[in-house]
Image (spheres, rainbow, N blue to C red):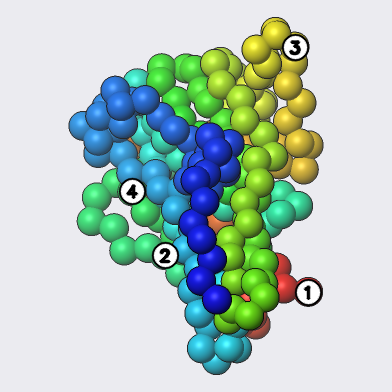
Amino acid sequence: MQQKQKRLSHEELIALRGLRLPAVALKRLKAAQIFASPAISIERHSTRREYILRAEESGGSTADIGAYCGFVGMDGTPLPSLQRAQSVGVNGPHAIVVASRLARVQMFRTENMCELLITCHELKPVEYQEKPVLKNRILFHGSNAVLPPNPESLPSFLNRAGEPQEIPAQFSEAIVRTSRGLSCRGCRHVHVLESGLTTTTTSTIHVLGRE
Ligand SMILES: [Zn+2]
């Protein structure tokens, strides 16, 4: 049965596609050749005959602008990378992850000011339809924060009324790792995902996040 496409609300759009940066910011990122993709695709795992999520950790920075997008488990714990991503230059794709559910940590920086978006994503079955749909939810969204000089500290965000916004504590480490990529000039590293080749916990091939 074909489901009728409904128009997404602004919040649903951010949850799905990530930060909606102004055109001037996108233009500056493009000019600086910084590519940080928040895209998450649904892929079919033919052996397991099930659908999984696929995403790429990517991004980097120059002196005055940066963007970085990383992925962790829904509880903020690191995920192992499936493999390194082929990339010709710097500040682009770094590694690929597949999982049945994941959280995305996306940051944008100009000078020492930053914006942070944390969203979670999982597949939900649809009645009478083989392919599931992607369900997305915003866990945190803050802007206009100063990046702390100590890279191990978290930025402090205020809401529109001037009150401190509480960052979900379980994502502290993921934010610190993403911040490192956000300020890494000419980035060629994998800052958020863990190496799938060297950790013993990932020596068995399975779809992560599946219980
Ligand atoms: Zn780096």
The residues bearing labels 3 and 4 have C-alpha atoms spaced at a distance of 35 Å
Helix, strand or loop under label 4: loop
Q: Amino acid at mark 2?
A: Arg
Q: Which residue is mark 1?
A: 211
The residues bearing labels 3 and 1 have C-alpha atoms spaced at a distance of 38 Å
Question: Please, is residue 105 above or below residue 183 in the view?
Answer: below
Question: Relative to 190, is 148 on the left or the right?
Answer: right
Q: Provide residue 124's location: percent of width, then percent of height.
A: 67, 67
Q: Which residue is mark 2?
A: 84
Q: Disc 2 beta carbon < 8 A from ligand 1?
A: no
Q: Which circle's residue, 4 or 2, is located before the other in the chain?
A: 2
Q: Nearer the viewer, residue 139 or 65?
A: 139
Q: Residues within 10 Å of mark 4 (few under 14, many from 20)?
A: many
Q: Residues within 10 Å of mark 1 (few under 14, many from 20)?
A: few
The residues bearing labels 2 and 3 have C-alpha atoms spaced at a distance of 40 Å
> Contact (CB < 8 A) between labels 2 and 3?
no
Helix, strand or loop under label 2: strand
Q: Disc 4 beta carbon < 8 A from ligand 1?
A: no
Would residue 59 be seen by someone viewing this image from the given angle?
A: yes
Helix, strand or loop under label 1: loop
Q: Which circle's residue, 3 or 4, is located before the other in the chain?
A: 4
Q: Amino acid at mark 3?
A: Glu
* Residue name at image x 67 percent, y 26 percent: 153
Q: Which disc, if any, is residue 78? A: none
Helix, strand or loop under label 3: loop
Q: Which residue is mark 3?
A: 163
